[in-house]
């Protein structure tokens, strides 16, 4: 088993440095089972908003490409990946938990989990939206995506954002990982690839629409103003 612990500024926010590091950690893990968690009181509080506020059209393309590649790498890791969601998992942090095979959070009522991108004025890259559509039960998609709320762990479990909210999430995550790791590794990897290999693939039309319609929103003055206001709180 390989334990990967996110640890960085902004409650382990996902910026270029963190995502590049995570990709490297997964590469080093090979096909080994992975326990993914965070340091302190957060799993990950989302994207690095300071970096987002400074994106240009060129750097936004590179940043979002890295974000999609990171989520895809977690989602398609050959071995089991289980998240111990040790605190807040917001926006990109919630996506990261969704990309894992299973995710367990604690019963701390202060921790918040959810996809609040729409509340910030953001649109998902198509590959990430495909991941959300695959992982969230259909009956809860509108609440999770359009509602854009941040939920307690118990409510997040009910919506499908995590597997379960339990009193001891570390023990539950480790037990789950041990159970999955007991399966034949080749069979697990093959079944996982069969289930997930094409989920995040995008058509040329979706790629074109993303570049024309979505990418400009990530560098718009309106978004930058909203992000800077959040950072000043």
Image: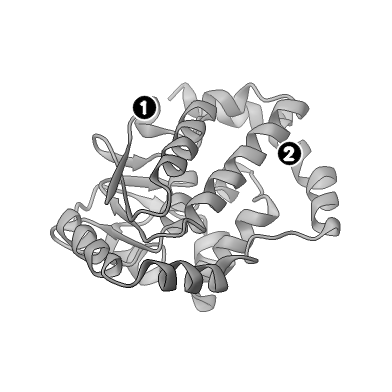
Q: Residue at x 44, y 44 (%)?
A: 26
Q: Nearer the viewer, residue 53 or 72?
A: 72
Pointer 2 residue: 217
**Label 2 crowd (10 A; few <14 / some 14-19 / many >=20):** some
Residue 28 x/y as whole percent: 42, 40
The residues tagged by marks 1 and 2 sit, at their Cα atoms, a distance apart of: 27 Å
Residue 136 visible within the image = no
Q: Quadrant of the C terminus?
A: top left
- Vertical comparison of 220 with 189: above or below: above
- Vertical comparison of 198 with 66: above or below: below
Mark number, residue 8: 1
Q: Is residue 207 left or right of residue 194?
A: right
Identify the element where label 2 is drawn. Answer: helix
Quarter occupied by residue 151: bottom left
- The number of callouts visible is 2
Question: Comparing marks 1 and 2, which lies closer to the viewer?
Answer: 1
Q: Is residue 132 left or right of residue 44?
A: right
Q: Residue at x 49, y 39 (%)?
A: 23
- Vertical comparison of 9 with 175: above or below: above
Identify the element where label 1 is drawn. Answer: loop
Quarter occupied by residue 121: top right
Q: Residue furthest bottom?
A: 139
Q: Is residue 48 left or right of residue 39?
A: right
Q: Mark 1 or 2 closer to N-term?
A: 1
Residue 5 visible within the image = yes
């Amino acid at each position: 088993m390989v334990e990967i612990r996110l640890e960085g500024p902004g409650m382990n926010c996902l910026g270029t440095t963190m995502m590049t590091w995570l990709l490297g950690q997964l590469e080093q893990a090979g096909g080994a089972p992975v326990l993914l968690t965070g340091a302190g009181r957060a799993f990950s509080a989302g994207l690095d908003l300071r970096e987002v506020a400074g994106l240009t059209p060129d750097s936004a393309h590179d940043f979002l490409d890295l974000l999609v590649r990171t989520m895809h790498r977690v989602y398609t890791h050959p071995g089991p990946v289980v998240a111990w969601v040790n605190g807040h998992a917001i926006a990109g942090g919630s996506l990261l938990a969704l990309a894992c095979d299973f995710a367990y959070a604690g019963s701390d009522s202060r921790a918040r989990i959810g996809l609040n991108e729409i509340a910030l004025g953001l649109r998902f890259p198509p590959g990430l939206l495909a991941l959300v559509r695959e992982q969230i039960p259909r009956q809860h998609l509108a609440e999770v995506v359009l509602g854009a709320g941040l939920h307690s762990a118990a409510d997040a479990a009910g919506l499908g954002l995590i597997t379960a909210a339990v009193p001891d999430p570390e023990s539950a995550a480790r037990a789950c990982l041990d159970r999955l790791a007991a399966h034949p590794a080749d069979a697990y990897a093959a079944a996982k690839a069969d289930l997930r290999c094409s989920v995040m693939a995008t058509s040329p039309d979706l790629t074109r629409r993303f570049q024309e319609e979505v990418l400009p929103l990530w560098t718009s003055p309106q978004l930058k103003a909203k992000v800077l206001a959040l950072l000043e709180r």
